[in-house]
Amino acid sequence: MTFQPTAEKLLPDLSRREELVLLARTLWREGYNDHLAGHITCNMGDGTLLCNPWLLLWNELRPRDVIRIDLDGNVVEGDWPVPPGIPLHLELHKRRPGVGWAMHNHPLFGTVWADIGEVPPAMDQSSSLGGGEVVLVSEYGGAVNSAKAAGRAVEKMGDADLALLAGHGVFVLGGSVRAVHQRAVALEQRCQHACYIRAAGAALISPLPPEFVKAVAASDGENFLGFWEAMVRQELRADPGLLDD
């Protein structure tokens, strides 16, 4: 008998709140761990967003802590305050209502390349997984707790799926939690490997065939079944009572 893997066989049923928590925790392990920085939003399709709250680290977030906000940043459900930088997400979801999930943080290597003002090429296949267009928002317009600065950043991002925000960090979008997770992991690997290659004195000339790069870039981030699920299982093993709220 041939085993046909499905997401249902690899994970328990997860609510969107649980997915948001697990995304935060898995990405914390991947280097998305700049203290209290960072926001994740899930578009509920009714003019509200699920969001991680202010004051909690991503690795201590639990489903009961997730808040629900409207597109003006008002809390409509939950007991925690809204993150100060949430205007970045509000402006994004207003301008691009079809985006399901968005994640912003300041991972080390992605932020280094944002500071340099350069998008490094994907130098290996793992660094290219998840697909999507990566752009540089080259002008630092101020902290994104300002709606004006946030709006400018989103406008300059255009229709891209991932952005390096100069002097700031990264912004990753996707249609699902799986897509954002895969893209965020691949982006940080891409930036890390490029840092090491350049530090070794080698040129950043990708050995990947152009047709491979083009095909992978066109991915919606949904094709690597098992990657997200495996990382979720790691979190559930580490904290068996995480979903017991």
Image: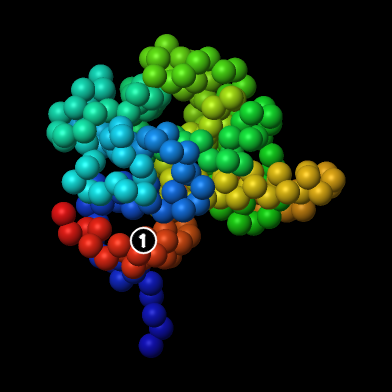
The image quarter in which residue 95 lies: top left
Residue at the (71%, 44%) spot, across then down: 195
- As drawn, the residue found furthest toward the top would be 148
- As drawn, the residue found furthest toward the bottom would be 1
Do we see residue 200 in this rendering? yes
The image quarter in which residue 204 lies: top right
Q: Secondary structure at mark 1?
A: helix
97 vs 172: above or below: above
Depth check, front residue: 119 or 174 = 119
What's the amino acid at mark 1?
Glu
Depth check, front residue: 126 or 113 = 113
How far across and how far down the image is residue 166, in percent? 59, 25
Residue at the (68%, 55%) spot, across then down: 124
Quadrant for the C terminus, please: bottom left
- Judge left or right: residue 240 versus residue 33: left
How far across and how far down the image is residue 44, in percent? 24, 37
Do we see residue 172 in this rendering? no
Residue at the (50%, 15%) spot, across then down: 142
Quadrant for the N terminus, please: bottom left
3 vs 216: above or below: below
Count of numbered labels shown in the rendering: 1
Residue at the (65%, 35%) spot, across then down: 113
**According to the image, label 1 marks what residue?**
235
How far across and how far down the image is residue 73, in percent? 26, 22
18 vs 69: above or below: below
How is the model colour-coded? rainbow
How far across and how far down the image is residue 18, in percent? 26, 51
Q: Residues within 10 Å of mark 1 (few under 14, many from 20)?
A: some
